[in-house]
Image: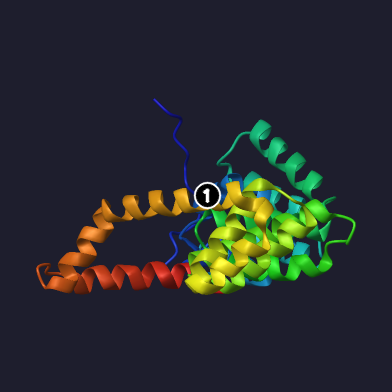
Amino acid sequence: MNNVCLCVGNYAKTPFYVKFSDVNLYSVEELCYYFLDKVHLLDDTIVTQELVYWIRTECGLDELADELEVYVRKHMSVAAFVTTILEKTGMYDENTIRKIDVVLKEQASLTMIERYKKQAEYLYQQGRFRQALVIYSELVDYIPKHETATKAIMYYNMASIYAMDFAYDIAADYYYESYTLFPDDNTKIAYILACRKSMTDYAYGGFKRENPDWEKDFIKAEELCAKAEDKWQASREKQTLDNIVSGQMYGENDLIAQLKRDYKRQTQI
């Protein structure tokens, strides 16, 4: 049987919304779990008067809020702020809190670029592509010119996001930027695919003639297109779309509503 944790404070009527992670928190225990789960993404943006106010008014923890207000006013470190909440709540043992403290102190030494890279990677992995794109777009201007491999990764990720939005012409430009900075076969194939999807057959034919050394890559790209088409034709999504178009499926409004919610989640800034 797991150990029982005695909760402190109130269950919030109004949740604390963490915009970065797109999550609502309803208790100080949920806040502590969020700290533990997202420890590698925490920075000084969590040390806010808004969070202190929520802890006071919604959770009813006046004594803790009084202490945290001092931290905010004196611009104390995120490590001190977070570990104080963890200690006062008593949700985790000393060893766990010590480990969190070490991670947060180590992260304090990261550069702005390193912190934002981690945030962008998290957003990308969560499928929140537009938010990630905003960070990538800003980062690419700050990365030193000599860090060509890092810049190439930023351009590649930006291109992939545009490709998922079917903006293949923009994606092709960014894949090309990535390839020129750090030549890589996978990037070359991605560039060719984006060009194939964005060009007319005539223009694509000219593109192939301009790059005779890429013959094997063009063949590989065509094979990938064929596989993707076969996969789409056999997919449940394709069947659902066909049923909606033919009028054989009822409840399509629910499906469209879900697609809208997913799109909003991916694109909200």
Residue toward you, 37 or 86:
37
Residue 88 visible within the image: no
> Residue 154 falls in which quadrant of the image?
bottom right
Q: Going 59% across and 64% down the picture, which residue do you hit? A: 20
Task: Specify few, some or many for label 1: CA neighbours under 10 Å numbering under 14, 14-19, or 20 or more.
Answer: few
Q: Position of residue 207 (x, y in %)?
A: 61, 66
Q: Going 27% across and 72% down the picture, which residue do you hit? A: 256
Check disc 1 and report the residue beneath it: 219
- Give the colour scheme of this rendering: rainbow
Residue 177 located left or right of residue 246: right
Up the image or down, 236 lies above or below 96; here it is below
> Residue 96 falls in which quadrant of the image?
top right
Residue 48 located left or right of residue 11: right
Residue 226 located left or right of residue 257: right
Residue toward you, 42 or 7:
42
Instruction: Count the marks.
Output: 1
Q: Going 74% across and 42% down the picture, which residue do you hit? A: 103
Q: Position of residue 39 (x, y in %)?
A: 65, 47
Q: Going 58% across and 42% down the picture, which residue do you hit? A: 90
Q: What's the amino acid at mark 1? A: Ile
Q: Position of residue 127 (x, y in %)?
A: 49, 58
Q: Residue furthest left?
A: 248
Q: Position of residue 158 (x, y in %)?
A: 63, 64
| Quadrant placement of the C terminus | bottom right
Residue toward you, 207 or 231:
207
Up the image or down, 14 lies above or below 180; here it is below
| Quadrant placement of the N terminus | top left
Q: Residue furthest top?
A: 1
> Residue 238 falls in which quadrant of the image?
bottom left
Per the image, label 1 sits on a secondary structure element best described as helix
Residue 137 visible within the image: yes
